[in-house]
Image (cartoon, grey):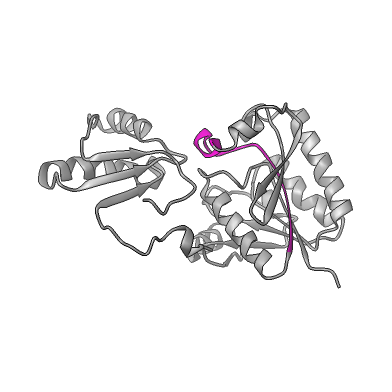
């Protein structure tokens, strides 16, 4: 009796350390792998931010647009199509067509029991529709509030998310039943077991994640508690870009805050 098979397929790279959705989906696949599920991954070299591609840039240098690369990731293997840009909106029609052809071929050869993915653009619709044409159920991972209309879920069999808040949002907006399954985190990749309690930590300094609040908090702490350091870890958002937006939107100059330490995007969060 063969193992159950799941194909993860979308136009992003699950090794993107600047994408919370990719990081979370990858953890889910690792947990499923431990439960005896066979996993195949088909993606492309698109990232939320170039910061998330730092460790892969050297590996991808020898390849051109449309080439496929196998990326080893512990027990997982990622088959990704190299794209000219690292941003999905800049994919060419030829690249989308080539990826879709490979996806169709993988469906026919691998014959998965389930297709798993995220994405709500026009070319993403074909992922679920191709699976449905082969009577393969599909699951979409929904972890933001940016989805509207009905086309994106028309051919999807199940919608899962990480939080009940997101599930409630789509129930209210579109009347959808979205299943909150939680966030899968491997503790030994996050906790050191020796708490230092030295800094305030802020990850992904973008306005949507509360960047403005942290800038104002840093200015307040500098006046009242200059002994407290805020460590900012860049991800999709960059600290300087947030400072610029605060200046433009609020007319507040927050440059040169000595109580803010900025660190680069990192896959291993234990040192933070």
Residue 236: percent from left, percent from top:
47, 40
Q: How many marks?
A: 0
Q: Residue furthest left?
A: 224
Q: Residue at x 41, y 38 (%)?
A: 264
Residue 265: name its quadrant: top left
Q: Is residue 161 above or below residue 259?
A: below
Residue 33: percent from left, percent from top:
68, 64
Q: Residue at x 33, y 38 (%)?
A: 262
118 relative position to 242: left or right: right
Q: Is residue 86 visible?
A: no
Q: Which residues are magenta?
A: 38-54
Q: Is residue 103 above or below residue 81?
A: below
Q: Is residue 257 above or below residue 124?
A: above
Q: Residue at x 40, y 35 (%)?
A: 238
Residue 82: percent from left, percent from top:
70, 33
Q: Is residue 75 visible?
A: yes
Residue 53 inside the magenta-drawn segment: yes
Task: Identify which residue, 29 or 149, lies in the foreground.
Answer: 29
């Amino acid at each position: 009796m063969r193992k159950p098979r799941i194909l993860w397929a979308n136009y992003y790279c699950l090794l993107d350390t600047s994408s919370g959705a990719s990081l979370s989906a990858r953890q889910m696949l690792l947990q499923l792998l431990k439960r005896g599920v066979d996993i195949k991954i088909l993606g492309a070299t698109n990232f939320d931010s170039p910061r998330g591609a730092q460790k892969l840039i050297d590996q991808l240098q020898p390849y051109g647009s449309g080439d496929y690369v196998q990326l080893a990731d512990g027990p997982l293997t990622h088959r990704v199509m190299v794209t000219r840009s690292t941003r999905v909106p800049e994919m060419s029609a030829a690249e989308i067509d080539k990826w879709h052809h490979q996806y169709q071929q993988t469906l026919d050869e691998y014959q998965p029991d389930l297709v798993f993915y995220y994405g709500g653009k026009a070319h993403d619709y074909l992922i679920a529709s191709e699976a449905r044409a082969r009577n393969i159920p599909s699951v979409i991972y929904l972890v933001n509030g940016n989805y509207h209309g009905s086309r994106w879920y028309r051919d999807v069999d199940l919608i899962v998310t990480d939080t009940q808040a997101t599930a409630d949002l789509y129930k209210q907006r579109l009347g959808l039943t979205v299943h909150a399954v939680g966030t899968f985190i491997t503790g030994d990749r996050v906790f050191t077991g020796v708490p230092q309690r030295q800094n305030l930590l802020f990850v992904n300094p973008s306005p949507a994640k509360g960047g403005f609040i942290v800038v104002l908090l840093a200015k307040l702490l500098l006046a009242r508690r200059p002994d407290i350091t805020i460590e900012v870890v860049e991800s999709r958002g960059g600290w300087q870009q947030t400072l610029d937006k605060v200046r433009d939107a609020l007319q507040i100059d927050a440059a040169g805050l000595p109580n803010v330490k900025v660190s680069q995007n990192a896959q291993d969060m234990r040192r933070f």
